Image: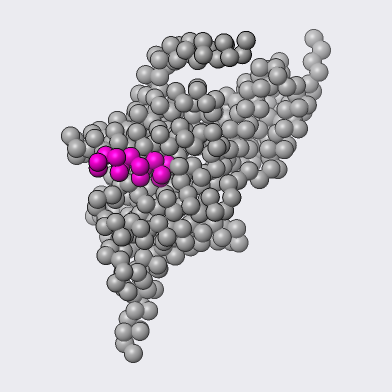
Amino acid sequence: MRVLIEFVISFLSTVGFGLITNVPRRSLLPAGITGSLAWVAYYLVLQVDPGLILPNFTAAIVIGILGNISAVLFRVPVNIIYVPSLVSLVPGGILYLGMRSFTLGREAPTSQYLFNTLTIAISLAVGFVVAEVIFYRIKPILMKIVTQRRSPSHS
Amino acid sequence: MENPISEDELIATCGKVGKILLTSGAETSRVESTVEYIGKAAHFDISCHATITALFVGTNQQSRTHLVKVRLGDFNLEKVDEINTMSRKFVEGKINFDELKIAIDQIDHKVIDFTWPQKIFGAGVVSVAPMLLFKATWADLGLAFFVGIFGYLAAQLAGRRIKTPYVAAGCGGFIVGLLAAALQTVGIATSAGNIIVSALMPLVPGVAITNSFREIVDRNTISGVVRAVDAIIIAGSIGAGVVLGTSLCSLLAHMIGGF
């Protein structure tokens, strides 16, 4: 039940950010599904390992693989799937909290928050790199399926 | 060998393609590869170097280089997609160079956008952050939906009127802080802090900072660092705006309470 609520809210979040950043309409649905599956993965891993690195890393791998697959299927640049589906994972709120404590002159929370921001951003970026490495292994198989599907409809 | 496309025209078009892609929020490596693909399809050996603030395009046969200045812009991913579709068509040979040039001019001038109600709805939905589910109360999350809309609208309107960089984000933060603190003072909301973090989601540069690290990992160090610093300063101006908003609210509450 709880997973379902998380799924729905993160789906809405992703689609909403897609509306703000003006993604093409045909990629709203795949981006939303990618974003919400990544969030569910994040949530599930968080129950096992309550740290920052592993949940974000897993979610980034999910986004990376699903994003690349839907980029091939729907013929859009990958970044268009990445940007909206990242919105619920991304360390924006923490970065804001860090800069706010900086404005208020509080030293300890500033360094804590900024450190967390750095950790999350780096684990997401590394997750994407790993996902792309995995995807290049799947790509030939995927391309074969796609061309088989498309060729009968064209001829 | 006769080539129907003149070198100067090709370089100018490539510069325009790169500029649109960079200002709409594509990664630098993607910009470079798109421009070089177009060059290859037109039978020219084009090389392109893109950083987030400038773009150089030139052919390898001669020494002239075309320089395009770029300003950091908002995300407009639909333009990235349209340019991508056009360049792909050109590379596959479905359209010729003149058609490509016309299409790119059109994309440059066209305002591709969702309607305002759609965007407002989007901002509201983003403001209900999954991060805070089951941490904040449901009522607070519901309020964050509306506070987020006002913050987003304030930032957009300010961005249109005021050209000084970073002021728009500060205005958004100010409105969000003011409203959230006011709601808490009146007693409708339980925690202003949760509302603020949730409602700032559409404004905060989280995606930008993640993209900047992706660029750094991709060895586009300059672009990555520029994006990261930009994101940190945006977050700083949002933070300053929120602090101003909340303290203004507590000041007002104090004065009203004093009378």
Question: Relative to residue B127, is residue B215 depicted above or below?
Answer: above
Main SS class of the magenta portion in the image: helix
Q: Which residue is at a point 71% across and 24% down the rendered structure image?
A: B63
Q: Is residue B173 magenta?
A: no
Question: Relative to residue B254, is residue B15 depicted above or below?
Answer: above
Give the extent of the magenta segment: A1-14
Residue reaching furthest to the bottom: B259
Q: Is residue A5 magenta?
A: yes
Question: Relative to residue A127, is residue A9 depicted above or below?
Answer: below
- In the picture, residue B68 is in which quadrant? top right
Residue A113 in sight in this render: no
Tell me where residue B192 appears, x and y as whole percent: 31, 64
- Relative to the observer, which residue lies in front, B100 or B170? B100
- Total count of labels: 0
Tell me where residue A32 appears, x and y as whole percent: 43, 37
- Relative to the observer, which residue lies in front, B209 or A9? A9
- Relative to the observer, which residue lies in front, B171 or B213? B171
Q: Quadrant of the N terminus of chain B?
A: top right
Tell me where residue A91 appears, x and y as whole percent: 35, 45
Tell me where residue A145 appears, x and y as whole percent: 47, 12
